[in-house]
Amino acid sequence: MGLGVLEDRVMEHVPGTTRYFDDPERPQFSRDGAEGLKCDTSGPVPIILVPQPSDDPNDPLNWPLWKRDLITFILSVTAIFATCLGPILAANTLTLTEDFSIRFAKVAELTGWYLFGVGIAAFFFVPSGRLWGKRHLFVGGTIMLVITSAWGGASRHNYASMAAARVFQGVATAPFESLVNVAVGDLYCVHQRGIRMAFTNLAVFGGAFFTPILVGKITHEIGWQWTFYLVAIFCGLCLPAVYFFCPETAYRRDQALNTDMLSSDGANTQQSLANSLDPNTQEEAEKTTERDAPSTPDTLVGEDGEAGLNANPISAAPPATSTQAPAASSSATPGVRPTATLPPKATFKESLALFNGRKAEENFVKLMLRPIVLFFHPAFFWACMIQGLMIGWTVFIGVILAQFFIGPPLWWGEVETGYAYTAAFVGAIVGFLVAGLLSDWSARLMTRWNKGTYEPEFRLLLIIPMTIFGCIGLYGWGPTADDLLWDIPPAIPLMFFGFQVAGMVIGAVASSLYIVDAYRDLAIEGFTIMIVFKNLLSFGLTLKAFQWLVLNQTKATPLFNIIGSVQLVVCLSSIPLYIFGKRIRSFYHRNDILALCKVR
């Protein structure tokens, strides 16, 4: 037993567990006998690159770092403008009720329709990104953002037109919410992703909470229509940058180069790959192909070797490069890489193509159905609950905030209501700082205590601060919001809102890291169902928020006592997952749930 994580009784080495002491992003430090592997030598200790870059100049891992960082920056900035459309109406509730002559609940539904569009579109865009790459989705999504944002601003007094525009705004946002982090996985080796992942997640989450702060003032000065027009303008400015400077990041890499995704021992796998790079051992490696074949099925790494937050997409059928073996041997022996002709480096004109070949030989319909199947996997169901519920409660508070702050006794306008989201923005920043600091420190400490063996379940320690921050926020919001009538300063319930947002962010990071580390080959489908679940749940909450308040005589305390208790139970479910998580990983590695449901 490793620090409370039960050992598996069947498999000696369970995928996700590594016997190397490593940091939370799992860079594998080079050891004696592994000199043939490509390493990052920029630091005092060489770090083995995971995954191993090929020799193909078109491999994104071989691009200059400045080019990869530029792509990440452009996609992140565009993602800020895309995701800001979610809360863009939060500060304008009163203004829109007057302009459209509708109730608060109907304004809340406009946010719900946006979330509905994001959730449904993710089912189609993620399989499309796996099969044909992500560039066409980023370019098409940016064009849609320009059109649909202008459409929203032009809707004026037509509620039906605005509702339709919100659905398509959600569709346009889906590529950026679901695939930007995957693109970061395409562009960087594991040890390089941490700070970039933090930046892209801050762009998506932090930008969303910063939006209402600006929207209130913009609405007050030049009208709510310009909040949409400005998004259209800025997305229009991003479009040339996305088109000209964001080439396709998906790449079909030989599965043998992905040394962290096999079920064999990491040291043996790396040594095998190192030997394959040595011409003196090439002939001997070929003779031992059958004897050294790993126990991992082809499809475990080849077809689904992609992780939504922290990994690279990998395909089972490698192209003909010097680092890739024929398909017959690729799935059998990692490290046997015969020489072949390298393709020429793509020209700038060629890099502008929206499609540059199929990235996987898989069925689109099966890819679309896989996330639904994974919802019934214990680990992915847990991740949906941990991340989706807290995001749903955040949307819920944002919807009913108008009831307490725009109405009596405060009678706030759009400017004050927008400034109220400062607490949520600060909470998002605090959450990212806490998650970043604790995830690094706790994983290193637990790995050291566990004699150098890293278990993905160590990531679940982040649920402790999530529970503290999140439950303080949920239990505190209700009574303080109700007591605004008794002259409690409005900063108090807003402070609890900030606590809740901090817990939400920590929970999102914790669940994402666990899925990436424990189920790297299934993470892309896992992140899809997490995105779909949280958006559809939030959509449902926007429809019922005011009804629940009415049933409780507009009192938030009893409602949030129930919500806080539900969240507490969900957080406590992390304890059995921590204890039995390794055995669950082993069971589902040996019993492929996707194959059983015929979607593999």
Image (cartoon, grey):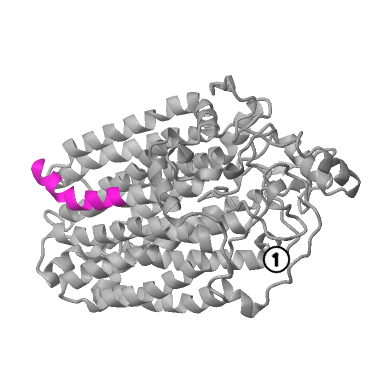
Q: Is residue 390 visible?
A: yes
Choose between 220 and 523: the one closer to the eye. Answer: 523
**Residue 526 in the image, given as x and y percentages of width and height:** 45, 45
Is residue 551 covered in magenta? yes
Most common secondary structure along the magenta stretch: helix
Segment tinted magenta in the rendering? 536-553
Left or right of 54, for residue 155:
left
User: Compared to 154, does 518 lie above or below?
Assistant: above
The kind of residue tagged 1 is Pro
Residue 85 shows up from this direction = no
**Left or right of 146, for residue 477:** left
Quadrant of the image for the N terminus? top right
Q: Residue at x 14, y 72 (%)?
A: 99
Q: Residue furthest right?
A: 280
Q: Position of residue 384 (x, y in %)?
A: 38, 42
Helix, strand or loop at mark 1: loop
Percent x, y for residue 498?
35, 47
Picture coordinates of residue 110, whole percent (x, y): 22, 62
| Left or right: where 366 falls relative to 398 | right
